[in-house]
Amino acid sequence: MKFSKYMGEWLYGKDGYYATYKDIGKSGDFYTAVSTSKFFGGTIAKHIISLVDEGFLKKDGVVCEIGAHHGYFLADICEFIYTLRPKLLSSLKFVIIERFDNLQEFQKNYFKDSFGDVVNLTHYKSLSELKCDNAFFIANEIFDAFPCELYYKGKVATVDNHNIEFDAEDSFVDEKAKKYHKTRGEIAIGYEEFALEMANCAKTFEFMSFDYGEMQARPDFSIRVYTKHKVIPFFDEEIKRDELFANSDITYDVTFEHVKDAYEEANVKFIELKAQMVALVDMGILDLLEMLREKADKKIYEQELQKAKILIMPDYLGERFKMIRFRK
């Protein structure tokens, strides 16, 4: 089979890595910005309020997270909206796009325990099921989880019994490799369809996503496996793919130029690409921390400050992770 199908089964198959509940953070395989600090969601909440104030997002618009996993990110956004502009919590419509029934159930229960009946949460299995006039879409680390093909000197990888061979041809992959000046590396599959689905489900929207990568393509392979906070290069000679399959996360660096092109082909305007630290500071994370300093116990403030630093310091998540933003 081609590598994209193999990766799809690894992550999203019946017993795939993301098909069942997984811990994220200290007890899981990796950290994310969401698992690091509530102020990640808080900063997005502040941005959503600014969109309402400027008139781009209507007070009864949709706030939609794609690939929510636990639902913690959207819940953090709701919590800060309640703190900063409580009336919006009852007027905005909150949506999660989640394909797996068991994760939908977990998210529903988490929201019920957190907010009771105050937050109106709706689930859809795909963007194609959602139809609305006005929306704000948010995703964290979604584009690195799209299946990809592995490309090496004109050939595409196939997998047989977890062994990799570069022996196939694919015109789409070859076209993208030439466009992004790659002789080896990953070519993501599905960005174009995803962008078109989003473009067709809302008349006007802003979409913001955070992921690791660069605008231009890397000149080599970045694909790797995360397990118990260890990073294992996918082509490591010692790797036991049969044991890691579906039991660990598999990911690669995002080529944001490919994401940008996919959305522009769907007639969605590219707004900006920024380092995560710049994006969060521009959207007001420091203002939120200052509010906490004024109102909270010093010990609580210091704890939250240290967590927030991981989001914005260059040596941690601040520089390697990027924010990309689009509008229609």
Image (cartoon, rainbow, N blue to C red):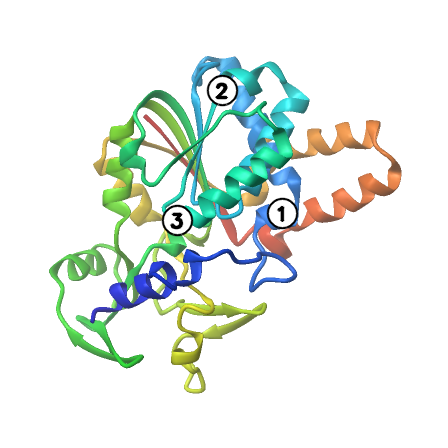
Which of pointers 2 and 3 lies earlier in the amino acid sequence? Answer: 2
Q: Nearer the viewer, residue 260 or 101?
A: 101
Reading the image, the residue beneath label 3 is: 100
Q: Which mark is residue 130?
A: none
Dot 1, how many residues are within 10 Å of its Cα: few (below 14), some (14-19), or many (20+)? many
Q: Looking at the picture, which amino acid does disc 1 mark?
A: Leu
Residue sitting at x 32%, y 30%? 130
Dot 2, how many residues are within 10 Å of its Cα: few (below 14), some (14-19), or many (20+)? many
Which of pointers 2 and 1 lies earlier in the amino acid sequence? Answer: 2
Reading the image, the residue beneath label 1 is: 311
Q: Looking at the picture, which amino acid does disc 2 mark?
A: Leu
Q: Nearer the viewer, residue 186 or 120?
A: 120
Which of pointers 3 and 1 lies earlier in the amino acid sequence? Answer: 3
Q: Looking at the picture, which amino acid does disc 3 mark?
A: Phe
The C terminus sits in image quarter: top left
Label 3: which secondary element: loop
In the rendered image, the residue lying farthest to the bottom is: 238
How far apart are the alpha carbons under marks 2 and 1?
Answer: 27 Å
Q: Nearer the viewer, residue 51 or 248?
A: 248
